[in-house]
Image (tube, rainbow, N blue to C red):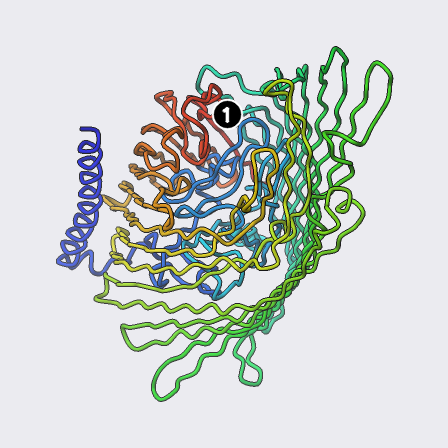
Amino acid sequence: MHSFMGRRSLISLLLATASLAVISTAQAQNAASSPEEEEAKPRATQLDTVTSTATRNPTAINDVAGTVSVITAEELERRNAVRMQDIIRYEPGVSVGNQPSRAGATNYVIRGMGGNRVLVLVDGLPTTDFPQSNEGPGTYTRDFFDIENMKAVEIVRGPASALYGSDGLGGTIAYVTKDPADYLDMVGKDWYASIKGGYASAGKTFSETMTGAARAGNVEVLGIYTRRDGEEIKPNSSWTANPQDYESNSFLGKLVFNSPSGNRLKITGDYLDRKVDTELNDEEGVDGTTTILSSDGTDDTERYSISLAYTHANPFLFVDSAEIKLGYTSLERWEHTDQLRLTGGTNFMRVSDLGFLQDIWVADIQFNTARNIFGVSHEFTYGLAADYTESSRPRYRTEENLTTGTVTNNVGSIQFPAKYFPDTETVKAGFFVQDDISLGRLSIVPAIRFDYYNMKPKPDWMYENVANPAYTPVEVTETEISPKLGATFSVSEEYTIFGQYAHGFRAPPYDSLNNGFEHNIFVPFPPPGQMISYRFIPNPDLKAETSDGFEAGLRGAYADGSSFSIAGFYNKYKDFIETVALAGSTPTNTTYQFQNLAEVTIFGAEARGEYAATPEWTLKGALSYARGKDDQTGAPISSVDPVKAVAGVAYDNGIWGAELAFTHAWRHDRVASPSDFQAPSYTVIDLMAHYDVSERLTFNAGVFNITDEEYYLSQDVIGVAASNPILPRYAQPGRNFGVNATLRF
């Protein structure tokens, strides 16, 4: 019965989405019959929004042979966005996981692919990742950016390796930072200044931002400083969240030189410092023969980057325009934990410091050449990209006997300081070429990229502390070719058919390739206890993970501002890297290794549309459906989100406006194990409003989860057993609100 009801609901929603497209079509046809409307200036649609990431050139979404979303700074302000989860709140098929005990936001997941399999760019350059073999008190997070600095966030579905190389296996998140001209052109003056304040009740987060921009001749400058202070996010359940306090400071600075000929030099500096203090109450209790009396954590994240982007707009030789980008990014993150432990009647203080250090040097050179060859228009985009990365994961731990005062670095049979994988130097380099071929209504866009990558381990005494000398780290050098072919066809002025094939790859991660260490742990059960040994050994034969993605769809865009897009996709992933227990292992003596094992298929469909009922009123809708399975075992892929739909109605008269949004997700019943928790279906209602009091003062406010629903996001509970007593900790916040105001001078 439940299955039938679910199918009926899905069919109803698909019909509703299709109806939205039909209504849009009907209105456009009716409008075409009116001479007055024919003379009216067409209104912009969502499909007119420009993306620079999908094709490496500014391109309207309607002309892209794939699915792209662009979320603007104005939308983020109106949503009172504070967290990564707020960015994609109304993006079906895209989600962000959350670890509520300590770390918070984990990473983006696009059509079931997440972690380092999603490429993250900042102003077109790759940024820091985080090790997947992240044992320790925290968990994976890539929350290293402040939303206030973003002019737009672009989300590109599907493999992106043909243009960007490794890591764009499942999709791309591109942060585009603000420029001085964004403010100066808005006010029509040579200077701009503003202060902004905001509050989000979920997490009791206060935000303060100061922005300044100026122009003198051909020189422009911008500075944005943001301070945030907040607490833990309380789940709407019986669970009491770990008490938490956090503070962050963010600064974005830009210096732009504009030449009279159109050339431009842009220097960007970005800095983020965040500190999170957590009382880890959920770690307290009995752990084997030890009682944990208290546990407190402090996570410090410091990230800074500097980049230079030079745009040459004047033709030279056979090149019409060129862009050179150079960048350096440094990330330093430390997870500190103080744990008071009672063992055998004696108190011990265990102090842990787990670090992740990464430095990236990037160079990206792109050329554009447009030519008419044998009567056919070609727009060539080609260039070189390279980056050099140093990655390190040091671990420090001591334990002090509070009775005798004795301090030891040998904790849990491990000699600290230690590194589970050696420091690694990674070099990636690629050459790419893309051709946009225009044949009247038909546009064909082939692209190909050749990549080289080398990973060289740099073992030191900290790695040798835990590594068996026989586990010799290996150096790996490989190449990869990534093709892509896209096409769009304008059936009429309103309708466009699109489709593409794209190949993606992800080089073997540095922390999987040479993960080599050995642990010996005494387990007190069954009495009288036993010694458990387990070890990881490197795998010199690891291959790159790969994907082949297919997508096709139909778009419609109308003069009244209505639009829709419907797409289906099929993605095949091979050689996924997973942990394997090697032959000969026993319950008390196990050897693990990372190996290319899994093959995964994910397919589905997405639809979205907007219906401009009047110049002020708009109806919106979006829907995603995806299904994934492990091709070897037939088991479902838990990271694939359940069916999700978003619908809303918005009013905007140019001075004030409001939007009522409904989000409904179906039950997450396709989980890898029958014993895993299946996130129930839910419906959440949000109300947002904005008011431009004057050119100087703007207010935004929103009430979220109006009905105070207790609900769970599937990404947060992957692998959590249905019988787990801590499930309530994963509940989303209850009814909450956010407000912000900007005063301009």
Quarter of the image for the C terminus: give it.
Answer: top right
Position of residue 637 relative to residue 220, above or below, is: above
| Residue depicted at 56% across the width and 44% down the height | 584
Q: Is label 1 in a helix, a strand or a loop?
A: loop
Question: Is 164 placed left or right of 259 in the picture?
Answer: left
Residue 491's x, y, as percent? 22, 67
Q: Amino acid at mark 1?
A: Ala
Position of residue 610 relative to residue 35, above or below, is: above
Quarter of the image for the N terminus: give it.
Answer: top left
Q: Pointer 1: what residue? A: 202
Question: Is 488 placed left or right of 390 in the picture?
Answer: left
Say few, some or many: other residues with alpha carbon within 10 Å of mark 1 (under 14 / 14 to 19 / 20 or more). Answer: many
Nearest the eye: 100 or 373: 100
| Residue depicted at 64% across the width and 22% down the height | 529
Residue 685's x, y, as percent? 34, 28
Nearest the eye: 657 or 178: 178
In the rendered image, is residue 502 in sight? yes
Nearest the eye: 9 or 590: 590
| Residue depicted at 71% across the width and 50% down the height | 422
Residue 357's x, y, as percent? 71, 46
Nearest the eye: 619 or 374: 374
Number of on-image labels: 1
